[in-house]
Image (tube, rainbow, N blue to C red):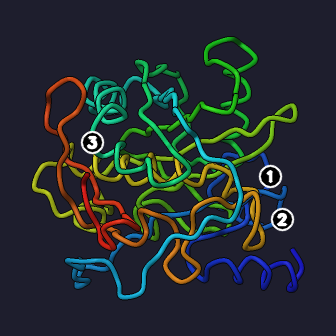
Amino acid sequence: MTHSRWLHILSLSTTLLVPACAAESDDADAADPSTDGTIVHIMPLRGPDAKVADAAPAGAHLTFFGGPTLTHISVHPVFWNANTQFQPNINAFYNAVTKSTLFDLLSQYSGIGRGSGVPGFVDNRTTTRVSDAAIHTELNRLFTAGSLPVPNASNYYPVHFPAGVTITAPDGSRSCVVFCAYHGTYVRNGVNVNYGVIPDQGGGCAGGCGANAQRVNNMDSVASHELIEATTDPAVGLATVFGPPLAWYDMTNGEIGDICNGQQGSTVGGDGVTYTIQLEFSNAANNCVAR
């Protein structure tokens, strides 16, 4: 990577956007930041003494930069293997929360409406040290095999991992050390692949990615952070300037979930169950809200 390229990416965010690695290795130490033109957008881990804000930062506002949104998202979870925890909850969560008042607040952003989710595909990967590029490779394998529907303008693929798996972002930062989760974009056969990476929320993520006493609730909160960001700014993984394909973004504070990072609330899903979620920023309310 050239120095000028690095500065170009930093112009979008000093902490939240990192260039994606082209290497296909599963070795977490393979952190050569050579780029395939994609970027991942991380949810940063909070330090042990960091206080969660109780409101949005002053002056926060999401601006539309012309990129696509997922107007009616269709969520297709992937479980790295059968040991991934909380699978029944995660399956219910995505289908229910995309039909909740949390999603109704997104109508102010390019008319986004409610979506849907399907039960996740249980993969059989045993690798415990995983690079971002290896996740691309595995998703592509599942598309080719017919295990997942091929990408389109609505699909989002959050990949959930079991305990004991370390995911390395393209810059070498590691799950539950630097980041709680991330979402990104890459192109397959000319079509954007909108995906998320959700580590197990125990271990180093515990306490730094959500203050709820129940790990499953922190998992839901982190998953909602990435879900809503992937809906309102799905092509962030291809953006290098403040313009298309970037969609809804705050030039100072980042995406809709970043503005409210770690602020938890709840929403009643379409199934009538109450789920813990992260609050999201509303331009209309000028604050972090759940509806």
The dot on residue 34 is 2
The answer to whether residue 78 is visible is no
* Residue at figure coordinates x 36%, y 43% from the top left: 103
Q: Spatial distance from mark 3 to mark 2, Cα to Cα? A: 41 Å
x and y, in percent, of residue 66 in the image: 71, 59
x and y, in percent, of residue 260 in the image: 34, 69
* Residue at figure coordinates x 45%, y 29% from the top left: 79
| Label 3: which secondary element | helix
Using the image as rendered, state which of residue 205 and residue 118 is in the foreground.
118
| Label 1: which secondary element | loop
Q: Spatial distance from mark 1 to mark 3, Cα to Cα? A: 40 Å
* Residue at figure coordinates x 28%, y 25% from the top left: 92
Q: Residues within 10 Å of mark 1 (few under 14, many from 20)?
A: some
Q: Residues within 10 Å of mark 3 (few under 14, many from 20)?
A: some
Single out the mark in the foreground, 1 or 3.
3
The dot on residue 101 is 3
In this picture, residue 246 sits left or right of residue 63: right
Tell me where residue 257 sits by quadrant.
Answer: bottom left
* Residue located beneath label 1 in the image: 23
